[in-house]
Amino acid sequence: MLRKEIKAAITLAILSPIIAELLSGSSPPAEFFNPIGFLSLVGFYGCGAVLIREAKARWNKNTASLLLLGAAYGVWEEGISVKSFFDPNWVDLGILGSYGRWFGVNWIWAYSLTIYHAVFSISIPVLLTEQIIFPEISDEKWLGRKGLSIAWFSFLFVSWLLNTFLTTYQPSILHYLLCIAIIFILIYFAKKFNIEFKGKKNPPSHKKLWLFGFTWVITFYLISWVSPYILRSPILTALILTIQLYLSYRYLAGIDWRAFDKRDLLALVIGLLSFWIILAPLQELDNPNRPDNTTGMSLVGLGILILLLWLWKKAGSN
């Protein structure tokens, strides 16, 4: 019989790639449920999320630190492992392979993907697993030395595989050093400082929290992937994206998070994921125009919706 802590770690290891890769359509069902692909995603995304969650628990840090650690993960994945920060021919880049490219770096892509991974690959799966699914052990360590060793080995091994075999492109040593420096800075701030939200406002209604999350994702998507086709200046695009982050911080920092309950958190998370749930069947309809096979994306969206509704019920009964 598995201990509850191990069950929580396994849940997080599976939930992270489900949200980050499967729901987003980056790895549709045909790719995601391929045994090799699934093990690789769990070993990389899943173990990365578990390691970050364990660091957060051991350092006694909050969600702000979790976001910083998630950003560090994003730089590791996209900068060091798959190298999409630098490869001008990366399959998903589109216009971002030239728009905002400077000194061999796809800057708008790098900025956007770092935010994406911080929110969707790490923070949302960790918060759902900790606060909603296993709230009774949310402050405890889930892994011992052996478990941590397995997670580190899996994460680093898959990282090496991706860097070596996914593409032949190799950035310069300076590009790698830049990523490592950014990762260390993000980890330092995540560990050293507690950025607490001590606002005075009561949590907004569930509808308003859902709307904020939903609107945030749509705005983020429009700025990151649509505005490059409209705005000539990548600097302007980066500035608008920075303003969005700042305004989001100001809004969230004004709320008294100590008054948050589980359904408040879940309403915000559901808002953030609703965009991808709605997009899922549209991706399947676009199957003839895509290089990958998006068959089954409608079921993915429906499955995540059912999961969230179940979590909503669970959050209300605790």
Image (tube, rainbow, N blue to C red):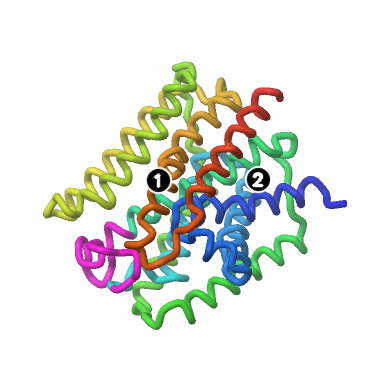
The residue depicted at 59 percent of the width and 24 percent of the height is: 261
Q: Amino acid at mark 1?
A: Leu
Q: Quadrant of residue 310?
A: top right
Secondary structure, mark 1, is helix
Q: Is residue 94 magenta?
A: yes
The residue depicted at 50 percent of the width and 45 percent of the height is: 301
Q: Quadrant of residue 232?
A: bottom left
Q: Viewer-nearest of labels 2 and 1? A: 1
Q: Is residue 71 magenta?
A: no
Pointer 1: what residue? 279
Q: Nearer the viewer, residue 25 or 66?
A: 25
Q: Is residue 160 above or below residue 138?
A: below
Q: Is residue 212 above or below residue 115?
A: above
Q: Is residue 249 left or right of residue 59?
A: left
Q: Which mark is residue 23?
A: none
Where does residue 92 sit, x and y in percent of width and height?
A: 34, 64
Q: Nearer the viewer, residue 30 or 175?
A: 30
Q: Which mark is residue 57?
A: 2
Q: Farthest right residue?
A: 1
Query: Is there any visible trace of residue 275 in the rendered image?
Result: yes
On the rendered image, what quadrant is the C terminus found in? top right
Q: Is residue 96 above or below residue 157?
A: above
Q: Is residue 88 left or right of residue 255?
A: left
Q: Is residue 188 left or right of residue 98?
A: right
The residue depicted at 71 percent of the width and 66 percent of the height is: 149
Q: How many marks?
A: 2
Count neighbours of disc 2 (C-alpha within 10 A) and say few if under 14, some if 14 to 19, many if 20 or more. some
Count neighbours of disc 1 (C-alpha within 10 A) and say few if under 14, some if 14 to 19, many if 20 or more. some
The residue depicted at 63 percent of the width and 54 percent of the height is: 14
Query: Is there any visible trace of residue 189 in the rendered image?
Result: no
Secondary structure, mark 2, is helix
Give the magenta-colored segment's residue range: 89-109
